[in-house]
């Protein structure tokens, strides 16, 4: 169970709650006690505590730091410190300070790794994916006027060639730097997105060779899935920031 004075109790969630569960709990509690929503249950002090709790628990990095402090407080309460000397207290305090220093350094290292990955991998890949997916609807509209028109088909083939180039750049960037563990979910969505894009481009290329509409529709569906995965990766990144 949460510590009696913890932010987890304020939001009425367990310490192992997911970020999504914490966000949901915050919205539920805010709605319950906010005067603009429920005047009968309005409680200014309660709203203040709820906002303070979510400000810490709603941010993954702040939450980790808070968890360390909360666990240390719980450990102290669990200990029976009888006849502790001033020297012992000083040693225990120094040990706690060193522990927090190491944790802060670890958090800073994780933050630096994440920023590096976002700048060198996520952002460039997202840019290349957009170069492929954003023009697709317009390209399909132009081609649908007359797929057998040589000029329109040549333009569509040029688009496919551009897609190949953008995909190749994205795949190279993805392999250029390992993703930090904290970004594993976003990296996985990017990886699967690129796979769907690759298969989609292949289907579109098949269509240019045999004019079979099934390849065109399959390519369209694969691009749709890729776009969903791209949005999922974006949501993952926003949760990390």
Image: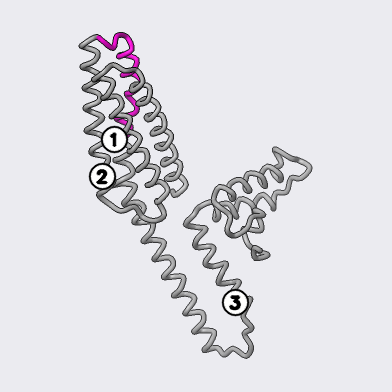
* Mark 3, residue position: 76
The residue shown at (21%, 22%) is 158
Question: Given the current orientation, which residue lies at the most extreme right position?
Answer: 40
Range shown magenta: 128-148
Report the side of 24 relative to 151 (left or right).
right
Q: Are marks 1 and 2 in contact (CB under 8 Å)?
A: yes
Query: SS at mark 2?
Result: helix
Is 154 rendered above or below residue 183?
Answer: above
Residue 128 - label: 1
Does label 1 or label 3 sit earlier along the sequence?
3
Is 133 rendered above or below residue 88?
Answer: above
Task: Answer few, some or many: residues within 10 Å of disc 3's Cα (few below 14, many 20 plus, some between 14 and 19).
Answer: few
Is 204 rendered above or below residue 235?
Answer: above
- Image position, residue 194 (x, y; %): 33, 38
234 vs 69, nearest the viewer? 234
* Mark 2, residue position: 173
Quarter of the image where one finds residue 206: top left
Queried whether the magenta region covers residue 218, the answer comes back as no
Query: SS at mark 3?
Result: helix
């Amino acid at each position: 169970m949460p510590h009696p004075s913890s932010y987890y109790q304020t939001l009425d969630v367990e310490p192992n709650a997911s970020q999504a569960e914490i966000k949901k709990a915050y919205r539920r509690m805010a709605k319950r006690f906010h005067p603009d929503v429920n005047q009968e249950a309005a409680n200014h002090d309660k709203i203040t505590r709820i906002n303070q709790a979510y400000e810490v628990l709603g941010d993954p990095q702040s939450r980790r730091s808070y968890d360390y402090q909360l666990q240390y407080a719980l450990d102290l309460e669990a200990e029976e410190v009888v006849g502790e000397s001033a020297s012992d207290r000083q040693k225990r305090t120094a040990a706690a300070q060193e522990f927090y220093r190491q944790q802060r350094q670890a958090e800073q290292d994780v933050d630096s790794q994440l920023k590096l990955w976002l700048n060198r991998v996520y952002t460039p890949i997202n840019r290349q994916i957009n170069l492929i997916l954003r023009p697709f609807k317009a390209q399909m509209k132009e081609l649908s006027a007359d797929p057998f028109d040589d000029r329109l088909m040549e333009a569509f083939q040029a688009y496919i060639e551009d897609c190949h180039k953008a995909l190749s750049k994205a795949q190279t960037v993805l392999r250029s730097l390992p993703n930090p563990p904290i970004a594993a979910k976003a990296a996985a969505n990017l990886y699967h997105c690129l796979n769907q894009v690759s298969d989609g481009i292949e289907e579109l290329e098949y269509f240019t060779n045999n004019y079979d509409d099934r390849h065109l529709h399959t390519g369209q569906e694969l691009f749709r899935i890729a776009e969903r995965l791209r949005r999922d990766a974006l949501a993952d990144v926003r949760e990390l920031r």
